[in-house]
Image (cartoon, helix red, strand yellow):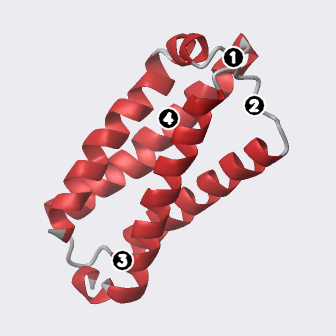
C-alpha cells in the first residue's frame, strides 16, 4: 500500500507539474491571476517534476534504501506548502479564483502530512 501510494503521488504530481511547467498560462487563466506569475509557475512545475515526481517514482520502483530520498521529498513538500500558506495568509496571490489556490494548499498540506507520517512511523520500510 505504501509503495502504491508513491506511484499515485508521482502520477498526480506529474499532471500538476506538467501544467505549471508547460502551460502556466492555462493555470493563470483558470485561476484568473495576473500573468506576471508565469515564470514562477514554470519554475515550480520543474521542481515538482524533478523532485516530487522523479523521487516518488524512484521510491515506488524500490523503496529499500530510499529513506534519504523520502526525507528530501518531505522537506521540499513541507517548504513549498509553508510558502503557499504564507502567501495565502498575506494575500500575495493575484488570483481572483481563490478557491483554486485554497484547493492547491489543501492538497499540498495532505501530501506533506502523509510524507511526515511516513518519516515518523514507517521509516523502516525505506531503510
Residue topped by disc 2 = 93
Q: Return the residue nearer the eye: 93 or 42.
A: 93
Could you tell me which residue is drawn at 60 percent across and 54 percent down? Answer: 81
Identify residue for label 4.
46
Q: Mark 2 and 3 residues: CB-CB less than 8 Å, in contact?
A: no
Q: Residues within 10 Å of mark 1 (few under 14, many from 20)?
A: some
Q: Quadrant of residue 61?
A: bottom left
Q: Position of residue 83 (x, y in %)?
A: 70, 50
State the residue position of label 1: 33
Mark 2 element type: loop
What residue is disc 3 on?
118
Q: How much space separates mark 3 and mark 1, taking CA atoms?
A: 35 Å
x, y (%) of residue 58?
Answer: 25, 58
The mark lying in front, picked from 1 and 4, is 1
- In the picture provided, is 36 more to the left or to the right than 21? right
User: At numbered mark 1, what does the secondary structure look like: helix, strand or loop?
Assistant: loop
State which tag comes first along the sequence, 2 or 3. Answer: 2
- Sequence-wise, the earlier of marks 4 and 3 is 4
The image position of residue 75, as x and y in percent, is 55, 66
Q: In whole angstroms, how far apart are the C-alphas of marks 1 and 4? A: 20 Å
**Of the image marks 2 and 1, the number of the one nearer the N terminus:** 1
Amino acid at each position: 500500500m505504501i509503495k502504491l501510494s508513491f506511484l499515485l503521488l508521482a502520477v498526480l504530481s506529474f499532471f500538476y507539474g506538467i501544467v505549471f511547467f508547460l502551460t502556466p498560462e492555462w493555470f493563470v487563466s483558470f485561476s484568473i491571476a495576473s500573468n506576471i506569475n508565469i515564470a514562477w509557475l514554470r519554475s515550480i512545475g520543474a521542481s515538482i517534476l524533478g523532485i516530487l515526481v522523479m523521487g516518488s517514482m524512484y521510491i515506488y520502483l524500490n523503496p529499500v534504501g530510499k529513506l534519504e530520498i523520502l526525507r528530501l521529498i518531505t522537506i521540499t513538500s513541507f517548504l513549498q506548502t509553508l510558502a503557499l500558506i504564507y502567501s495565502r495568509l498575506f494575500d500575495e496571490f493575484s488570483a481572483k479564483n481563490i478557491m483554486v489556490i485554497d484547493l492547491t494548499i489543501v492538497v499540498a498540506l495532505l501530501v506533506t502530512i502523509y510524507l511526515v507520517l511516513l518519516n515518523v512511523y514507517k521509516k523502516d520500510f525505506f531503510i
